[in-house]
Amino acid sequence: METISASAQEKVLTIAVPSYNMEKHLPKNLPTYADSRFGTALEVLILDNASTDRTAEIAEGFVNRFPQIFRLLRRDSRGYGSSINAAMEQASGRYFRIVDADDWVNTEDLLRLVEALKTCEADVVQTNYRKVLMATGEEFPVRFHDVEYGRLYTGFSRCRLNAPCIHSTAYRTRVLRQNGITLQDKIFFVDEEYVILPFLYAQSVIYYDLDIYRYLVGNPAQSTSPQNRAKYAGHREQIVRRLIKVYKSAQMNPDVRGYCFFRISQAAADHLTTLYMYLPDRAEGRRRALEWERYVRGEEREIGEAVRKKALLLRQLNRLHVGLDFYEKLKKGILCK
């Protein structure tokens, strides 16, 4: 592929790499952008969130070697949400996406994406990705279903079939900035805000048959690990409360409302799973889950109704002290479909 050109005033794509004590992972992450074929079209913002290890030193090495691609933003806060907020403010690219520091990208497909974005008009961009098992390196492709790649869709009905996630999603930077999109700080699970809030203002979506993101799974330090889901259950609740509040008050067309209803109902139900199944003290989990059910029904009756069936099942599993291993098997079977 030839070198991609872009104007000096505007990059094509900004990638934010929030990093706190990531000296172990950055040597795998950063080289996947360090390719002269990007020319001046790609911007990678490495956000050093008050790291105490060699994160900044490693980042500076890439800034010195590829100054046209990398920028290092030193911050005095460890907060992930404020890190992304800072990146959205400083991004020079027409499009914006996030790659966590312990993940990486496929360089060849990223080159193709940047080329495609030069003429793209969509507000939301979706690309395929792969999950990579930390223990074995085995890869599992995640692809979109029932979409025409390269077609500009002006509705989001297919986003309910293929739920956007942080690993698949890029946005037109203007949509984020002009509408004041911000993520909450110093809490986990803000990726749910990232894949819901911008849709309130987006008008179109496009899917590219490109396999960009490599998502490392099986890391016990991740927020999605069983231990952290239990430990930070309050964070998840704070996120979903904000989403429900926005859903109640925002002006949305029916198509966007359908997408937001689907995603927020999913998040509310998943929080019930955390409370009923992941908290070590099952009685405490049941008490908190019942409180959560009452809150959701009181705030937004339709969302409360959407999670009712799953709540009944989870309550029975909780009372029977069904373990997480068996619950995971049930999720893959008919009971939880």
Image (tube, helix red, strand yellow):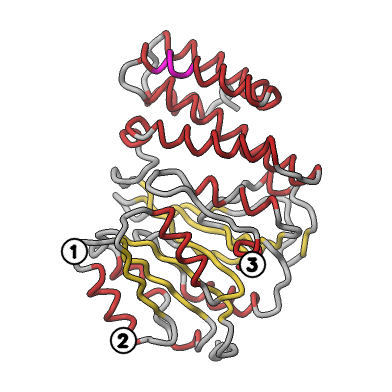
Q: In this view, does 242 lie to the left or right of 224?
A: right
Which is nearer the eye, 119 or 20?
20
Label 1 vs 3, first from the N-terminus = 1
At x 54% / y 33%, what residue is drawn? 241
Q: What element carries label 1?
A: loop
Which is nearer the eye, 41 or 71?
71
Dot 1 crowding, Cα within 10 Å, few <14, some 14–19, many 20+? few
Give the x, y percent position of residue 184: 47, 48
The correct choice, above or below, for 111 with respect to 177 in the image is below
Q: In which quarter of the image is residue 21?
A: bottom left
Give the x, y percent position of residue 133: 36, 50
Give the x, y percent position of residue 55: 25, 67
Give the Cα distance between marks 1 and 3. 33 Å
Reading the image, the residue beneath label 1 is 53
Amino acid of disc 2: Asn
At x 30% / y 74%, what residue is drawn? 59
Q: In this view, does 53 lie to the left or right of 5?
A: left
Amino acid of disc 1: Asp
Q: Quadrant of the N terminus?
A: bottom right
Amino acid of disc 3: Arg
Q: Does the magenta stretch include residue 286?
A: yes
Disc on res. 64: 2
Q: In which quarter of the image is the C terminus?
A: top right
Q: Does the magenta stretch include residue 34?
A: no
Label 1 vs 2, first from the N-terminus = 1
Q: In which quarter of the image is residue 312?
A: top right
Reading the image, the residue beneath label 3 is 172
Give the x, y percent position of residue 40: 51, 87
Q: What element carries label 2?
A: helix
Give the Cα distance between marks 3 and 2. 28 Å
